[in-house]
Image: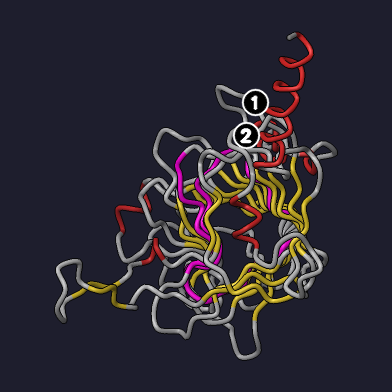
Amino acid sequence: MRHLITLLLLAATLSASAANPFDNPDTIVVARDGTGQFRTVGEAIEVCRAFMDYHKVIFIKRGVYKEKLIIPTHLENIELLGEDAEHTVITYDDHANIYLPSLQGGDGGRPMGTFRTYTLKVEGSDITLRNLTIENNAARLGQAVALHIEGDRVSVVGCRLIGHQDTVYTGKARSRVWFQDCYICGTTDFIFGPATAWFERCHIHSLADSYITAASTPQDVDYGYVFSHCRLTAAEGVSRVYLGRPWRPYAYTLFINCELGSHIRPEGWENWRNPDNELTARYYEYGNTGPGASPQPLPKGKGAKADAASQRVSWSHQLTKREAEAITPATVFRTATDWLPAGANDL
């Protein structure tokens, strides 16, 4: 009898294992050519167990994956790892002005809107994206998000984030996001949202005369966007780009020790056509170099419509050395639960 019970327990264990052979801490492989366990990234995400307490890698071989993806809230400790950033491409082409069908039928409908346009949406926490191109290649017909992040403690390392308007949306207040060694390009407000995000050694490339950031940092959150040791460039013919404008009144954005190209406007910042934002927006710079760095503020009263010979708007701030040295990843990401990304250990 005891032998029979043992056999039954063993059979049950084997059956449970067979139900999900990928429920283990090892790497699983995605390849469009069929040489991996899965041909799509979405299929690999589907087999991951909820609330894993170990690190699982989804290794994605070179190829173009036309998929609209969500990493849901119940998934944690997952890394999407591309074979190499330039040739491992996740792409889709939704934009805000695509009309959704009417739920009641007929010819009616409504535009998709910005926040449904993502190529990849990260809802889960403790997620890493590495060596990937994440792209929204929609025509320039409206806002089109490539990467939408709502999870906390998300790291984006060595990735290429490609789009036009609204490329990267850091979409949840008080969530913490780390970008390291990434290439991010776009036209208007192509890095936007309320999260706290640190950009380390990123290449920020403007494709049109417009705005780079549109932070919407809440009033009671100390830090929004920090760009550290980043390089700002522009496409040929692009020559009048603002560092940012406040999507919400208390927007926080800091550029520290960055190289700013000649495409950055001398005034630096714009008030989103609302002078009241000048009283609340938190815009800072320190130690920037290059032709787009303008360290001296404008005289009071000049505002954001200064001519090209003038310097930064009077309502932005140049930090002192002591103030700048106090801003570290550990400080910026400190909340009720401390978090320091692996790439920030040496800063």
- For the question of whether residue 174 can be seen, the reply is yes
**Disc 1 designates what residue?**
338
- Spot occupied by residue 193 in the image (x, y as percentages of width and height): 46, 53
**Disc 2 designates what residue?**
333
Q: Nearer the viewer, residue 19 or 79?
A: 19
- Spot occupied by residue 144 in the image (x, y as percentages of width and height): 46, 72
- Spot occupied by residue 117 in the image (x, y as percentages of width and height): 43, 67
Quadrant that contains the C terminus: top right
Amino acid type of disc 1? Asp
- Between discs 2 and 1, the one toward the N terminus: 2
Is 200 drawn above or below residue 307 in the view shown?
Answer: above
Q: Residue at x 62, y 36 (%)?
A: 332
SS of the residue at dot 1? loop
CB within 8 Å, label 2 to label 1: yes
Q: Residue at x 34, y 53 (%)?
A: 277
- Spot occupied by residue 270 in the image (x, y as percentages of width and height): 43, 65
Amino acid type of disc 2? Phe
Q: Residues within 10 Å of mark 1 (few under 14, many from 20)?
A: few
Q: Residue at x 74, y 69 (%)?
A: 290
Residue 29 belongs to magenta span:
no
Residues in magenta, as a range: 145-173
